[in-house]
Image (cartoon, coloured by chain):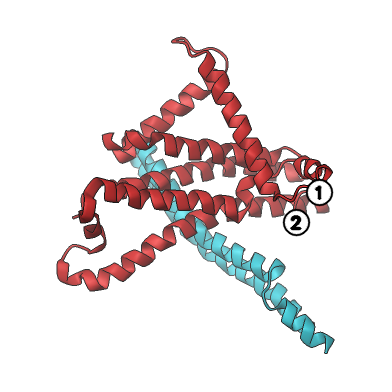
Chain colours: A red, B cyan
Amino acid sequence: MTHPFLFLQWLEKQFHLHLGEHVTYTWLVMIFLILVALLVKRSIQTVPRGLQNILEPVVTGIEGMIEETMGPKGKAYFPLIATIAFFILTSNLIALIPGFYPPTANLNTNAAMALTVFAMTHIIGIKEHGIGYFKHFCGPVIWLAPLIIPIEIVGHLARPLSLTLRLFGNMYGHEVVLMIFFALVPFLVPLPMMLMGVLIAFIQTFVFMLLAMIYIAGSLEEAH
Amino acid sequence: MEFFAWCVMAAGIGMGLGSFGTGIGQGIAISKAVEGVARNPGASGKIMTIMLIGLAMIESLAIYVFVVAMIILFANPFTASVVEMLGR
């Protein structure tokens, strides 16, 4: 249930390397993003031209959303969230080009990103509140703590799991459905599914970004 | 051989049940969101954001079922032992 032909995998076979297709396509997405960033950085102007026109509203939009959900303190975490958003969006969208495999349709890529967000929330929490961060886990009243702490721990551990599986399930499910449609009727029938793929790519990026923001904002706020 | 037939059935029926509940849940959520926007169109941006988060949460239920179905179909941990038993 994968693509019939992936050009980077073919290239890999020519060089007798043993890398997963998700690794090579992650590198491709990284190279693409770095090149675009360098191209835009070289010619930043007050009146945007060309590529800057596309990227400026997106970056401003993400900045506004961070301001809205995380408050003024959240500005420091803009690079992390924007990087994750751009990476996920690009790797979701290359799924629609024949010969490309979305790195997000593999559990390992998603687990890496979800664990980064998970670790960041706790690091930020400890950096922000010191030892008082553990009040977040104790609930409102101190004698309820033995009851609340296990629930909170399970809740926190469920976060990276759900982040990983949501993105993986959406992207992989879309791949499987597309392949089944291609096998049944290759002409014109998979097209609505591909349109749905564009929608899914944007919505899943948005959801991942928003949940990362909410988790980080949750550890930024004071315990109550 | 019956084992594999039951595997396929379990995957199919499980996916159906999972998407059944998820569909109802998402329908309720969207209907309430549309109601809210109709009453107060000015708040549509905020309602949209909250609705999308909620939908993603509900949707993950169906995604879990999908992952389990894929494990049953393509990565079943019992397949090796069943094949070995059949061979005997």
The answer to whether A67 is drawn above or below residue A175 in the figure is: above
Q: Is residue B58 visible?
A: no
Farthest residue, direction front:
A16
Mark 1 crowd level (few <14, some 14–19, many ≥20, 10 Å Cα): few
Seen at 73% across and 77% down, the residue is B79
From the viewer's side, name the closer residue of B51 and A147: A147
For the residues labelled 1 and 2, the Cα–Cα distance comes to 9 Å
* Rendered location of residue B65, percent (x, y): 57, 66
Q: Which mark is residue A4?
A: 1
**Is there one chain holding both mark 1 and mark 2?**
yes
Seen at 39% across and 30% down, the residue is A63
Mark 2 crowd level (few <14, some 14–19, many ≥20, 10 Å Cα): few
Please tell me whether mark 2 sits on a helix, a strand or a loop.
Answer: loop
The answer to whether A218 is drawn above or below residue A29 in the figure is: below
Instruction: Indicate the amino acid at tag 1.
Output: Pro
Q: Report whether A142 appears left or right of B31.
A: left
Seen at 76% across and 39% down, the residue is A98
Seen at 48% across and 41% down, the residue is A206
Please tell me whether mark 1 sits on a helix, a strand or a loop.
Answer: loop
Farthest residue, direction bottom:
B88
Q: Which mark is residue A221?
A: none
Question: Which residue position is annotated with label 2?
Answer: A1
From the viewer's side, name the closer residue of A19 and B73: A19
* Rendered location of residue B7, percent (x, y): 70, 76
* Rendered location of residue A182, percent (x, y): 79, 49
The answer to whether A98 is drawn above or below residue A171 in the figure is: above
Instruction: Indicate the amino acid at tag 2.
Output: Met
